[in-house]
Every structure is written in structure tokens, then in C-alpha cells.
Image (cartoon, helix red, strand yellow):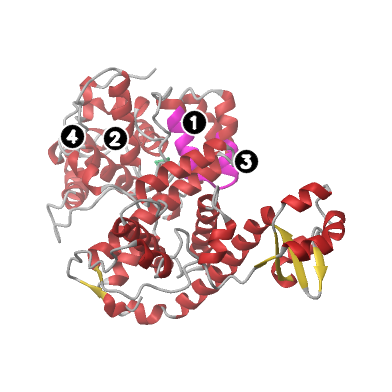
Amino acid sequence: MAINQVSRRRRRGNLQVRDSKVLDSGRFPHRLSLYNTPPNDEVSLEEFESSGYDRLRLLKAVEQARLCHPKRGPQYFKEIKKACDKYMPLGDSGARNAADVYEERRKDHLSHFVLRLAYCRSEELRRWFLQQEVELFRCRFENESINDFLNAIQNLKYDKMSDEEKRELESQLKDCGFNLSIETVRETAYYKLPFKRALELVRQRKVLLKGGMAYVPEQELLSIICSSFRQRLSLALTHACKALPALEEDERLDPILRTMSKNDLADEQQLQNRTGVVHPSDLDELSNTVMPLCMRNLHVNFKADHHLKHWGRLQYGLFLKGIGVMLEDAINYWRSEFTQKMAMDKFDREHVYTLRHMYGKEGKRTNYTPYSCVKIITGQAPGTGDHHGCPFKHFDGSHLVKELKSTKVPNPAIQEILKLVKDQHFQVACSRYFAYKIGPLPENVDVPLINHPNGYFTKAIELNNFKAGIVNAGASTVKSESLPINE
Ligand code: SF4
């Protein structure tokens, strides 16, 4: 996609597609794509951004499903399908309206290239994107006809073996690799491809090699197609990275892509909606019930030490602002704690301005938003005497176990959380903590992937209210004193 093809105008679907023949032979001949050709139509800035975020949400759901179901059982596929239907549906053309099918495929295509631009800028981002995209591709391929895909995607030249050729080679096919019976060989479709494309199977001596070609049974082809997709995408990401300096000059796209690459899916609207509903006198109770571990840790230590260092004040202060502690209440709250160790006028001199600044009442009057998990996890690591950061990332094992025990997380759950932490899946560990702390969750409610402490808080309140049967208690109107305690 050329940068100058991203326009500020809102695009009103300039579909030229009117029948399925155009779909079959046009830009998107199959519902799945290897994303070889970038979009070349005009795209509005709004569409550019929203499609990118939808794909990001989908890839985060893929990541969570894979982490929660490493054996890729039925629940894994169910969760990914649900996320696909929600964020990026890709139905079969079948009897559906061709224009709808076209729009779905177009969004899938565009969003892939938007995230490709956002996630090419570092080795770590490239690795993450590559992993989730290949996983998504593999999942979407479930129940797909390989033959239909190969017929539609012209640049994968894997020839199907003719019946005659198979008859000639059937005894050799039977003897190599998979211990198939002769009947199974006859029923299985085989594909011929250059042996370099099937090196893993060649290494395992699982395919017949003849004249530089590997004869691969259909059921093994998916892994080869996925590996080809991975190689192409990896190369494309490296090329995109080289083109980044030109993109960085574009003042419209660069900030969008940088924000996107921070993986920050905070729902700003949701955060704003909570203003003015929590009183500091409720914080002790809330810290035990609906605050994430990072904020509970800050709260507990603040109450114990009557002091928080700079990063702790920022992390906790913005969180409180986000959950709805009003400025005057916040000043009184911080003052009541700090002045147990500090003179009142010193507090007023040193901290009131900062608190007002945090609420957008001083300086540039920026309305600062609470920190997301990514910002906390990748931000300034806590030093001695600091209490900010993410416990799942920054606590050592014994400290984390102690904290989890103090919040009454059962032992098996602690072991599960420790394993996730060991594998560096901090937000997934937090999701498991959420599930144990707030659970049991109502039927049909999935454990959310935690990506924002304020999102955690809001979701926890909603679920507690739901379980307590408080109907229609919108997050924006819930009074904290009405919160049921989950102990
Ligand atoms: S994952 Fe996020 S919400 Fe959970 S403890 Fe860490 S920073 Fe807080």
C-alpha cells in the first residue's frame, strides 16, 4: 500500500463487485490469502486505523488461546473461531452476497498489511506478529480443502499426482514414512513439490524422493504451506522494516503505527466512563476484591509506608483517576497518607501541583490516561523501595507466591500462574489470577485477556455485579459501596 493512498476522507465502499465470478477470479480468489500483494486502493485514515486494531485484537485472542490451550484441542479452535467471527469474519462465498464477501476479504487483507507496517520495526515485534499470523493462518485452514486453496492461489505450484503416476509408485509410497497400508495410499491424495520445500519431511525420511521432487501426502501439506507462508512473511517484514524511514516522515501514519505496535488495546471510552464514582474510603475494600495485583500491591504499600515513590505515584494515581476518584478526593486521600510522615505545607508544595497536573488541571492540561499493562511491564523496572511495576513480571518467585497466597489464590492455581510467569506470559498469568479471584465466572463468559489494570477493574466489577444479580448496573454508574465482595 502506497502511503499516499491513505486518505483522510471516509471511504464509502466503492465496490465494483457485483457477482461471485469477479470474486473467484479477482483480487481475493479464496477466503484465505498468503498476502503477497499489498492493497492498492484508496484507504481512509479511519479505516486504516480501525482495521489494524481489529486485527490486533484478533491476534491477541490467538495468542491467548494458544497459551491457554498449548495442545490445540477443540476449545482452542472454538476460542479462535469466536474471535475471528467477532473481529475479522471470513465466510465462504457460497450463496452469500458477493459484495459482503468482498468487504470481509478486503478488510482481512488491509488489516494484515497495516499490522505488517506496525510490527516490522523491531526483531521482537516481527517475531510476535509472525507467530500469531502463522497460527491464525493454520487455524483458519482447519476444514479447508487444500485442493481448492492450491487451485485458487496460483503462486503455490504444488502439482497433484495423477492416478496413473500414483499407481506406478504406490508400493514405494507405501514403504516410505507413514506406515500406510496400500489401501490408504490409494485413497490419499499426493502432491509433488521440489524437495527443498519439504526439507523437514525429507529429514525425517517420511516422503518419497524422485527426480528432485518430494511426494507429500495431503495431510502433511498444511505444515508445508504454513512454513512457506512463514518464510514469505518473515522476508516481507524485513523488507518493510527497511522502508520504515520513509514512513516515519508521514506525520499521519507514524503515530498510529507506533501506538499500535505497543499492543495497547485500552478502551479509552471505558476508562473515561468511570469518572466520579469511587470514593477513597472504598479503596481498602476494592483492593481486596476487584483491583489487579499491581494496584493492590501499590495500595497496600502506600497504606503501610504512607509514601510512594515517583513511578508508584504515577502508576497508582492515574489508575485511581481512571476508576473514578475525583481530583479533590484524590488530593485529600494522598494528603491524609503522606502527612502521617510529612508536614502538610510540604505535601501541598510538592505534590498538589503534580496531582492537579495528572488530572489535566495544570501545565499543558493534558488529560493523562492510566498506564496499560504493556507500559507497566516494559516500563521503568522497580528498584529498592519502589512498588510500581507488574508483580507477574517484576516479583521474584517467592515474593509472587507470598502475594498470591495472601489474596487466597489456591495452590494449584499458584502453580499454573508460576508456570505462565516462567514462560514470560505475564498478562495471561494475570488473566488466570483474575479467573481465580473473580470466579467462578458465569457460563458463556470467557476469561478476558488482561491488557489494562483499569480494564481488569471494570471487568471485575461487571462480573461481580452480574453474579450478584444487579441488573443494568452500567460501569459508569456503579457506586462502589454497592459492590459485592467476593470473599
Ligand atoms: S498484567 Fe497488567 S493488570 Fe495484571 S498485574 Fe500486570 S500490569 Fe497489572
Give the residues in magenta.
417-435
Residue type at mark 1: give it. Answer: Glu
Determine whether 81 is above or below 48 in the image: above
The residue at which mark 1 appears reads as 403
Cα separation, mark 2 vs mark 4, equals 9 Å
Q: Residue 476 carries which label?
A: 4
Going from N to C along the chain, the mark reached first, 3 or 2, is 3
Local packing at callout 3 (Cα closer than 10 Å; few below 14, some 14-19, many 20+) is few
* Circle 4 or circle 3, nearest the eye: 3
- Of labels 1 and 3, earlier in sequence is 3
Question: Is the residue marked by circle 2 packed among few (<14), some (14-19), or many (20+) residues within 10 Å?
Answer: many
Q: Label 2 is placed on what type of residue?
A: Thr
User: Spatial distance from mark 4 to mark 3, Cα to Cα?
Assistant: 39 Å
Q: Which mark is residue 458?
A: 2
Label 3: which secondary element: loop
Q: Percent from the top left, x then y, of residue 164?
A: 76, 64
Rendered view: 402 above or below 294: above
